[in-house]
Image (tube, rainbow, N blue to C red):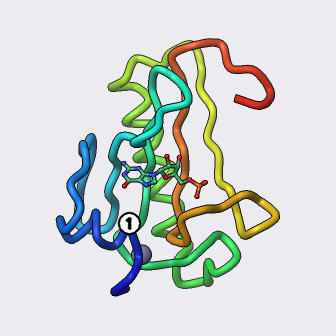
Amino acid sequence: MRDCLFCKIINGEIPSEKVYEDDEILAFKDINPKAPVHILIIPKKHISSAMEIKENDESLIGKIFTVIAKIAKEQKLDNGYRIINNCGEDGGQEVMHLHFHLLGGKKLSIDI
Ligand code: 5GP
Ligand code: ZN
């Protein structure tokens, strides 16, 4: 996707601090961290939001969650963490490429 910020991060046009990468998934540090650990996990395939997930994406979405668990372990978030997906305008989504926030490293309040 030509004008998508996260597609540009995937193709290296915009630099990022990567923490995980495989052929289908990329994880990188959020530029404006809301917690000691704040990582974004995204599919390399451009899916604009959780509203656009299709049946043939089910294994990819499942894999994202095993990757999140792996990253959380590496980041030593053994006491717990939060996974957030903001979906669409009312959900507060700002970047229209599906992403999951992994937040942790402190006791999180309800509004992060
Ligand atoms: P959303 O509000 O769409 O759920 O979250 C978008 C997230 O992307 C925000 O937490 C924001 O800080 C992060 N973000 C926006 N632009 C960039 C960028 O250029 N690089 C990185 N690493 N994160 C970004
Ligand atoms: Zn994209």
Q: In front here: 18 or 30?
A: 30
User: Is the residue 58 above or below the residue 106 in the image?
Assistant: below
Please tell me in which quadrant of the rendered image residue 84 appears. top right
Q: In front here: 65 or 110?
A: 110
Q: Position of residue 71 (x, y in %)?
A: 38, 35
Q: Position of residue 37 (x, y in %)?
A: 45, 26
Count of residue discs? 1
**Label 1 belongs to which residue?**
6
Taking the image as shown, residue 105 lies to the left or right of residue 8, namely right
Whether ligand 2 has any atom under 8 Å from the Cβ at mark 1 is answered as yes
Q: In percent of the image, x 37 and y 85: which residue is there? A: 1
Please tell me in which quadrant of the rendered image residue 24 appears. bottom left
Q: Position of residue 87 (x, y in %)?
A: 70, 64
User: Is the residue 33 above or below the residue 17 in the image?
Assistant: above
Q: Given the image, on which type of amino acid does mark 1 rest?
A: Phe
Specify few, some or many for label 1: CA neighbours under 10 Å numbering under 14, 14-19, or 20 or more: many
Q: In percent of the image, x 41 and y 76: which residue is there? A: 4
